[in-house]
Image (cartoon, rainbow, N blue to C red):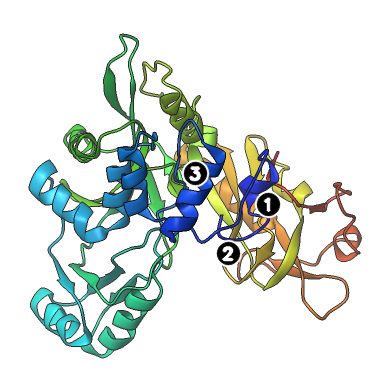
């Protein structure tokens, strides 16, 4: 990873810290470890070097060209329109502020500014009037996964639902590559980052079929094997393709409760070449993020007794070594008799969790509610000094990924 003590490092046999966008560093790591497969977990990686490595015989999941295409919004949008022939919003590519102003004048407002090399909402801004163009252009060009003066501006779709279609390219029982699309996952982003998702989201048959055909068309063009998160907008009876990630998706965390095989298990199954005869039946479930409200190192967590009091609720803490405002430190996943019940349970549990941050230059810790507005008084145990390495009463210091 790009920083030490990243969550996966804490459970891996070996780990390395390197600038993953640096081709020579990526190649040196691959040649040193000689892996059976290379599985990118993030788009912020030297994709051109992945293409070269694959050409030399290394196996990249889902395949190197898929990683390169999805890293580049322009490339994936052209693939969607010209090859997969799916419906998207109108868009323009611009390279400077003057071009951005011209694009907004042509597309109208609201308009969405996006970094060319980004994912998960980083570098994205919705511009509602001409006065916001300069700020949005700078945000998109400077704060994507990689800095790039070239950005994408697209027509704003006033959607009814934002949906992720988890799409698995895998081997079927006969040994042939097949495509299976899971039940629709709806999600909301109060700002630009993932906040809550649930599955299954009911749609009329025509919309469900359009979502499935869109996801299948795009992923079949990308090829390879593994899980893809295909994001779409639904407006009335229309479906618009938005973007795709060639890996498990943040909105897909809900599958830890809604499906027998989570998105992670499905990804592993495809990578290992094991047969799959889905799709997964989905149980009503929802996921809700646990956010940090302060900055500091070694977060620990209180409020666990309250968070886990209801039946059907699970808590997954990521084990991130540091926090900053609104960083996702974990997620609650809840099952319910209905989607509404599951959403309410997941939200209540997430709001009960308190991230406690060690602030540099200050002794001890201070309570930092995980969600703005959640200010309940901590218990005596929660307010005390955290005990390292074990859970005490209602508090748990998390030095590695953990779940209940």
Residue drawn at x 40%, y 15% is 275
**Farthest-out residue, bottom:** 131
- Between 370 and 88, the one nearer to me in the picture: 88
Which residue position holds label 3? 30
Quadrant assignment, res 208: top left
Q: CA distance from mark 3 to mark 2?
A: 30 Å
Which residue position holds label 2? 327
The spot of residue 33 in percent (x, y) is 56, 40
Residue drawn at x 45%, y 39% is 38
The spot of residue 398 in percent (x, y) is 76, 52
User: Badge 3, how many Cα within 10 Å: few under 14, some, many 20+?
Assistant: some
Of badges 3 and 2, nearer the viewer stands: 3
State yes or no: discs 3 and 1 in contact (Cβ < 8 Å). Answer: no
Side of 392 where 271 appears, left or right:
left
- Between 209 and 98, the one nearer to me in the picture: 98
Q: CA distance from mark 3 to mark 1?
A: 26 Å
- Name which of mark 1 and mark 2 comes first in the sequence: 1
Which residue position holds label 1? 319
- Between 38 and 241, the one nearer to me in the picture: 38
Q: Is residue 317 visible?
A: no
Of badges 1 and 2, nearer the viewer stands: 1
Query: How many marks on residues?
Result: 3
Query: What quarter of the picture does the C terminus occupy?
Result: top right
Query: What quarter of the picture does the N terminus occupy?
Result: bottom right
**Farthest-out residue, top:** 174
Of badges 3 and 1, nearer the viewer stands: 3
């Amino acid at each position: 990873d790009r920083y030490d003590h990243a969550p996966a490092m804490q459970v891996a046999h070996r780990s390395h810290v390197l600038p993953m966008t640096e081709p020579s560093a990526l190649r040196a790591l691959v040649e040193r470890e000689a892996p059976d497969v290379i599985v990118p977990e993030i788009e912020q990686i030297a994709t051109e070097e992945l293409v070269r490595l694959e050409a030399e015989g290394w196996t990249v999941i889902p395949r190197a060209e898929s990683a390169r295409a999805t890293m580049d919004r322009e490339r994936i949008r052209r693939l969607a329109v010209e090859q997969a022939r799916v419906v998207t919003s109108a868009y323009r590519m611009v390279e400077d502020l003057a071009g951005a102003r011209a694009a907004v004048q042509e597309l109208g407002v609201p308009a969405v500014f996006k970094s060319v090399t980004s994912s998960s909402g980083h570098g994205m801004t919705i511009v509602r009037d001409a006065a916001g163009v300069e700020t949005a252009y700078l945000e998109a060009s400077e704060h994507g996964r990689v800095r790039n003066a070239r950005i994408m501006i697209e027509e704003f779709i006033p959607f009814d639902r934002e949906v992720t279609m988890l799409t698995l390219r895998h081997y079927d029982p006969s040994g042939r590559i097949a495509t299976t699309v899971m039940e629709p996952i709806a999600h909301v982003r109060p700002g630009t980052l993932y906040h809550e998702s649930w599955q299954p989201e009911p749609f009329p048959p025509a919309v469900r079929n359009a979502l499935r055909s869109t996801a299948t068309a795009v992923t079949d063009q990308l090829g390879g094997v593994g899980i893809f998160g295909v994001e779409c907008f639904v407006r009335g009876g229309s479906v618009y393709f938005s973007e795709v990630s060639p890996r498990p998706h943040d909105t897909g965390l809900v599958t830890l409760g809604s499906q027998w095989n989570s998105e992670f298990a499905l990804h592993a199954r495809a990578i290992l070449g094991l047969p799959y005869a889905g799709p997964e039946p989905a149980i009503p479930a929802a996921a809700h993020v646990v956010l940090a409200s302060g900055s500091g190192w070694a977060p620990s967590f209180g409020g666990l007794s309250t968070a886990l009091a209801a039946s059907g609720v699970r808590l997954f803490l990521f084990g991130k070594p540091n926090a900053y405002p609104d960083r996702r430190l974990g997620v609650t996943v809840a099952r319910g008799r209905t989607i509404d019940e599951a959403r309410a349970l997941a939200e209540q549990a997430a709001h009960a969790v308190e991230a406690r941050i060690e602030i540099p230059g200050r002794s001890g810790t201070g309570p930092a509610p995980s969600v703005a507005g959640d200010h309940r008084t901590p218990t005596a145990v929660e307010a005390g000094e955290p005990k390292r390495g074990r859970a005490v009463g209602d508090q748990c210091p998390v030095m590695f990924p953990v779940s209940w």
